[in-house]
Image (cartoon, rainbow, N blue to C red):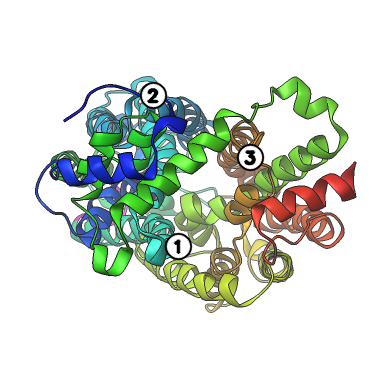
Amino acid sequence: MSTTTLAAGEYSRAKIQELVDQTPPSGRKRSLGAIAVVATLGSLLFGYDTGVISGALPYMYLPRTADGLALTTTEEGWIGGLLCIGAALGASVGGKLSDKYGRRHNITLLAIIFLFGALGCTFAPNIWILYLFRVILGFAVGGASATVPVFLGETAPKRIRGTLVAVDQMMIVFGQFLAYSMNAILARMFGGPEVTVSRDVVNSAGNTVARAGDAVAWESVQNFADVMVSSGNGVTWRYMLVLASLPAVALWIGIRLMPESSRWYVANLRIPEAIGSLKRVRNEAKDGPIAEEIDEMLQIQRKEANQEKWRLSQIWSTRWTRHLLIIGIILGLADQLTGINTAMYYTPKVLAAAGLPMSDAISLNVVSGGVSFIGSAVGLWLVTKFARRHVGIYQEISIVVSLGLLSAVFFFLIQPYQNADGDIVGAPTFAPFLVLIIVSLFVFAKQSGTVTWILIAEIFPSKIRGTAMGLAVGALWIANAIVAIVFPIMMDRLGGAGTYLVFCLINVVSLIFYIKFVPETKYDSLEELEERFEREYS
């Protein structure tokens, strides 16, 4: 096998065919289905680690004597926010590591970081150590979001490339659903957050709420300043988090059995290795000659070798590319300012605020998770049938209506019945379930109407795509972090009505943005879009 590295232009079709004839497969044949299952374990972990915290947080609020972390509202927000900050870093650094060392190499490293982060969070002795490992875990989440879709897109043949990348997005949502399901099972096994009080608890009216030695739900006594606790079931949150280590181990084992991306090899002009890798995953009867596919990959390298990549300063100083960059960044911000992660991270908190016992709230989170997964499947159909802008407008209208209704339910049916101790007394029994239905409609609308990732992948010309997408995705993760941090504080100070009214109004602005400023990208090639945008926005 030749090890001489030639320039892209020096590989003629005859030379490529000669190398194809000479080069054996680099290992055993692997089906595309097996590759997809293994690689998307990274996306499943992405979903699990972002979703599992919704069930773990209520147990972290328990006092240390009950094996909790004595969490405060502000600390709760930072547990979610720091993961997003780590993800923003992981998406940026992970993408560069992937380009330098390879997609498979990067996923192998991410599997180790997922395992290290999951175990670190599980055994964290205090909130500060938990913060550190949430950042580490976030780095793996962000790295997976940047690497796994690229690995799948580069490994799959044309005929199923879109399907495999779409499956990757569905696995993120499935990971969240799996987290909610595990949370529900553990909550049923160990009960909702409970404590054993060591002395009588008396409310403001002088009535005894709990007697010394009683095991009671934490939400029934947490607002009493003088409550004394001897024990509890706070350790349950550690069981929820440690389960993420199992897919991490499976990912590390599985990805080592898979070939590297042939396109990564070609990008680094390691053509014999690219051929050996491609022979492990291609059926030439269905996918065409390997020599032809390698030649197509090299054609891109020949073209890009002569195309200058723009720096950020040049992007910003050129009117039409600045316009596209601003649209991309606002799309990233708007995607998270929908408030979707108030549902992904905090649905049990919302349901408990509506009057449900915390154990039921954790269990019923499975409903919104299942609806979210169904919504992502519907979204695959919508983006193939309808214009991108129209799907985005449908999403924003649906979210505005959902959040407006949610704010109204809290304002009229829940908050008027909240007493001085924070308990809800006399509210309609259907009110919490109405909240669950509306939250489920909200996540369905968001997941079925998500076009952000498609739009930011299509609007940027190739010479600015890497830099511009990095900024847009970075903005998305930063907005995610802001929502995660401020939502618990907003719920504490504004209540459900005020909090969701704020998010509703933000989405009104996003709706106007989609109608007025977002361009349609579905019906043109990337090259045609570049010419059109330069003509329209210059």
On the image, numbered disc 2 is attached to which residue? 100
Q: Nearer the viewer, residue 131 or 471?
A: 471
Q: Nearer the viewer, residue 457 or 450?
A: 457
Where in the figure is residue 453, as x and y percent of width and height? 58, 52
* 10 Å crowding of disc 1: few (<14), some (14-19), many (20+): some
Q: Earlier in the sequence, mark 1 or mark 2?
A: 2
Q: Is residue 236 visible?
A: no
Mark closer to the observer (1, 3): 3
On the image, numbered disc 1 is attached to which residue? 162
Mark closer to the observer (2, 3): 3
Distance Cα–Cα, label 2 vs label 3: 19 Å
* 10 Å crowding of disc 3: few (<14), some (14-19), many (20+): some
Q: Which image quadrant is residue 371 in?
A: bottom left
Q: Is residue 192 magenta?
A: yes
For residue 173, above or below residue 492: below
Q: Which image quadrant is residue 426 in?
A: bottom right
Q: Is residue 4 visible?
A: yes
- The structure residue drawn at horizontal position 25% and vertical position 51%, both measured from the top left corner, is 215
Q: Is residue 398 left or right of residue 432?
A: right
Q: Secondary structure at mark 2?
A: helix
| SS majority, magenta | loop
Q: Amino acid at mark 3?
A: Ser
Q: What's the mark number on residue 462?
A: 3
Distance Cα–Cα, label 1 vs label 2: 25 Å
Where in the figure is residue 91, as x and y percent of width and height? 48, 33
Q: Earlier in the sequence, mark 1 or mark 3?
A: 1
Q: Earlier in the sequence, mark 2 or mark 3?
A: 2
Q: Secondary structure at mark 3?
A: loop
Q: Nearer the viewer, residue 59 or 366?
A: 366
- The structure residue drawn at horizontal position 83% and vertical position 44%, both measured from the top left corner, is 534
Q: Over which residues does the magenta segment extend?
A: 190-194
Q: Amino acid at mark 2?
A: Lys
